Amino acid sequence: MNSTFEQLGFTDAQIEYVKDVMEQRKQKTHKAFFDRYGVENLEALDDLFELAKKYKKEHEPEKLNYKEELEKLPKLEELIGLKFVKDKILRLTALNKKNKTLKNKISMNYVFVGNPGTGKTEAARALALEFYNNKIIKEPKFIEVDRSNLVAEYIGQSAPTVRRTIDKALGGVLFIDEAYSLFSGEDDIRDFGTEVLTELNKQLEDHRGELVVILAGYKRETLRMLNGNRGLKSRINSIIEFPNYSKDELIEIAKLMLSKSGYTISKDALDEVVDMVYSNADKYEYANARDLRNTLELLYEFQAYRTLDNLKDRCIEIDDINTLKTLDEIALSKEFADDEPKVKTMKVGDSL
């Protein structure tokens, strides 16, 4: 059967998916698939091939626009801070380039761990560009997914979804954000995340050297996932930890964000906004550059309202930050007030 599919120009993932449909047709777990293509009875092989042709036509991979993809990928040296991470990526580049020269087929599976907003996604994009420029991967392709893109609606459908995702990423980089959300800690075959990880293990082995896979997330949760899945852990080449940004690095990131948004900022205001963000660095929910971006976006609102009579003015001033601080204080005091127990004055005769 495989040879017939191959003659039709099917990829491995497409072959596996259609075979999976055929195997599960009696359980009706692919009812949505049948409804979509208007085929209810697949007993005859001819019906299956007709269905396969319809599926292939609709799921034909898009041709990659190399110019557009390259423009999306930042250069490694453009990343702010992250010296250890950048050095590590350069060493991985050298290693994989040598292995390609020696025609060694080794896996390229990495784990990026760290707090939110520490540049994991941007570093992964920079790695994709570095690997492509050094002919380690064939295409400047960066596919970003999370649990919602891998877990299907019914039991048995997640594995084909993983295969299609891997197939789409072949020759490039697959970035799985918040990968730890796929791990429940329970050895339950009915858990969709477990099904994804089981299939991912198989695909990492079957396509060793054909793509880069990066799992990203919080350190504690991600390491818990790896320790609970020995198969996956054994297929990881490197775990790279991303530190929180320093205050000086946040200043540089703020300048870059402001420039891209077409804003300027006074020195006093810049120092103040970074101090505001960095003051939360010891809190669990601290999100580094993400918090900085969210704060700047609020300041754009206050600045726009303050300078409504002058649309050309796009400079953040200390007044805008003071307005934000005042509103934060009001919100905080209200939050505490709402949490206080309400005292009811009772009169004689009132029921408890």
Image: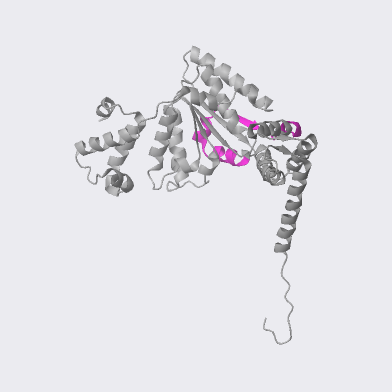
**Residue at (75%, 31%) from the top-left corner?**
248
Q: Quadrant of residue 205?
A: top left
- Residue 17 % position (x, y): 34, 36
Q: Is residue 5 visible?
A: yes
Quadrant of the image for the C terminus? bottom right
Height in image: 236 above or below 273? Answer: above
- Residue 87 % position (x, y): 65, 22
275 drawn magenta? no
Quadrant of the image for the N terminus? top left
Q: Count how many numbered circles sit on residues in the image.
A: 0
Q: Can residue 286 be seen in this view?
A: no
- Residue 308 % position (x, y): 69, 45
User: As drawn, which residue projects farthest toward the right?
Assistant: 268
Height in image: 158 above or below 80? Answer: below
**Residue at (58%, 33%) from the top-left corner?**
121
Would residue 117 appear left or right of 23 to someone viewing this image? right
**Residue at (56%, 38%) from the top-left corner?**
227
- Residue 9 % position (x, y): 30, 26
Q: In which quarter of the image is residue 95?
A: top right
Residue segment shown in magenta:
220-249
